[in-house]
Image: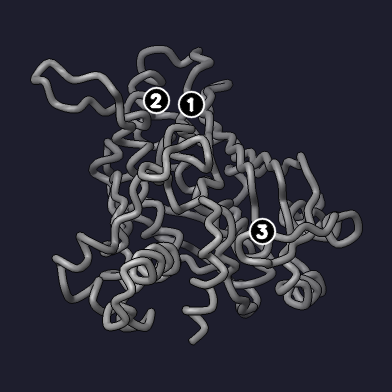
């Protein structure tokens, strides 16, 4: 049988051959896009942590825990030396610093991140990214009040787990991160999120005693982001299967706009020269029974033998368009 990783590699070839060039209006970064694709992995046949380049497993673990625990401040990630989310809070910081015209506030990014780690007050002010995945999964904001008169929130993820236990035949097991109230020009300027929600909805389903999960990702950076997304949501599938008492089924990854950034073309061509190796496996070393009991160190990754990593720069595109973004990008470079 063809190695399942070829689905990913073939999709990169598809984009190289058929992708249409687009330019982000905020950053000027170009990408090559196709629309409407799908890959799927049978989790009984290995864990889909890509082998044709080493995937940052520590980052996958801590980011998923960050989401699952409902957090939205990057301090947890920074404290664990995971820096994949550093750019977005720093971009907001630069934007506000530019508007304040107080030059002494414009810290270099490395100094900014160090202050996030060492200064709790500074982290509380500048490290938060409201209305992103963890908050929306676990504390979706409502207009209504609870019985105590406090702002009401919805724990979508906990609801899905309880619904699986109450009604395994349910067709409505969806967790959504796409809230128009806070996105793009649908939002007021005050409420608009500066971070673009990319992997915006997933659905869980039980078939023949197996739990499967399908992710819809409206925008996907196939070189840097997608390997991370595959591993993260495949692991989430395994965790949900464990806490609900089912065997793991499939992780299905459905894409809207899936693209290669122009600055990643050489790296993609290098990766395509590599033949996939055997997928690793996941073992849980703790008998946790709820998602709130889960901790990253409860996961053992077994027999992961990838090719070396291929480094590339992150393109911080999308989100709320602001004419000042080009200036902010220039500020970061100086």
Numbered tag placed on residue 291 in the rendering: none
Q: What element carries label 2?
A: helix
- Give neighbour class at mark 1: few <14, some 14-19, many 20+ (Cα, 10 Å): some
Q: Are marks 3 and 1 in contact (CB under 8 Å)?
A: no
Within the image, what quadrant is residue 189 found in? top left
- Residue at (68, 67) in percent of width and height: 29
Query: Taking 203 as reference, is 297 above or below it?
Result: below
Nearer-the-camera pick, 319 or 60: 319
Q: Viewed as shown, does residue 138 lie left or right of 331?
A: left
Q: Position of residue 153 (x, y in %)?
A: 26, 28
Q: Position of residue 108 (x, y in %)?
A: 37, 83
Query: Taking 137 as reference, is 79 above or below it?
Result: below
Q: Is mark 1 on a helix, strand or loop?
A: strand
Q: Position of residue 289 (x, y in %)?
A: 27, 36
Numbered tag placed on residue 25 in the rendering: 3
In space, the residues marked 2 and 1 are separated at their CA atoms by 7 Å
Instruction: For marks 3 and 1, give the one nearer the viewer.
Output: 3
Q: Viewed as shown, does residue 154 lie left or right of 37?
A: left
Within the image, what quadrant is residue 84 found in? bottom left
Q: Are marks 2 and 3 in contact (CB under 8 Å)?
A: no
Instruction: For marks 2 and 3, give the one nearer the viewer.
Output: 3
Q: Are marks 2 and 1 in contact (CB under 8 Å)?
A: yes
């Amino acid at each position: 049988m063809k190695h399942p990783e070829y689905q990913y590699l073939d999709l990169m070839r598809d984009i190289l051959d058929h992708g249409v060039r687009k330019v982000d209006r905020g950053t000027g970064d170009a990408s090559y896009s196709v629309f409407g694709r799908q890959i799927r992995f049978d989790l009984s046949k290995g864990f889909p942590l890509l082998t044709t380049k080493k995937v940052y497993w520590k980052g996958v673990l801590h980011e998923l825990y960050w989401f699952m625990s409902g957090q939205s401040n990057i301090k947890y990630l920074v404290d664990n030396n995971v820096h994949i989310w550093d750019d977005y809070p720093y971009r907001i910081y630069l934007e506000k610093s530019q508007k304040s015209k107080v030059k002494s506030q414009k810290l270099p990014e490395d100094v900014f991140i160090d202050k996030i780690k060492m200064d709790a007050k500074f982290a509380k002010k500048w490290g938060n990214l409201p209305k992103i995945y963890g908050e929306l999964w676990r504390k979706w904001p409502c207009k209504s009040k609870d019985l105590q008169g406090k702002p009401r929130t919805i724990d979508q993820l906990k609801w899905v787990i309880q619904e699986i236990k109450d009604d395994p035949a349910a067709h409505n097991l969806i967790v959504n991160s796409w809230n128009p109230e806070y996105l793009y020009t649908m939002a007021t300027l005050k409420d608009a999120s500066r971070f673009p929600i990319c992997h915006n909805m997933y659905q869980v389903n039980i078939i023949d005693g197996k739990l499967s999960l399908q992710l819809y990702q409206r925008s996907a950076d196939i070189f840097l982001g997608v390997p991370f997304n595959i591993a993260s949501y495949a692991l989430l599938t395994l965790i949900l299967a464990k806490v609900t008492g089912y065997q793991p089924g499939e992780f299905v990854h459905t894409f809207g706009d899936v693209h290669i950034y122009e600055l990643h073309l050489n790296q993609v061509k290098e990766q395509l020269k590599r033949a996939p190796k055997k997928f690793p496996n996941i073992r849980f070393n703790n008998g946790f029974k709820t998602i709130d009991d889960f901790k990253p160190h409860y996961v053992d990754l077994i027999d992961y033998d990838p090719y070396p990593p291929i480094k590339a720069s992150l393109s911080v595109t999308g989100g709320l368009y602001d004419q000042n973004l080009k200036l902010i990008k220039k500020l970061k470079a100086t």
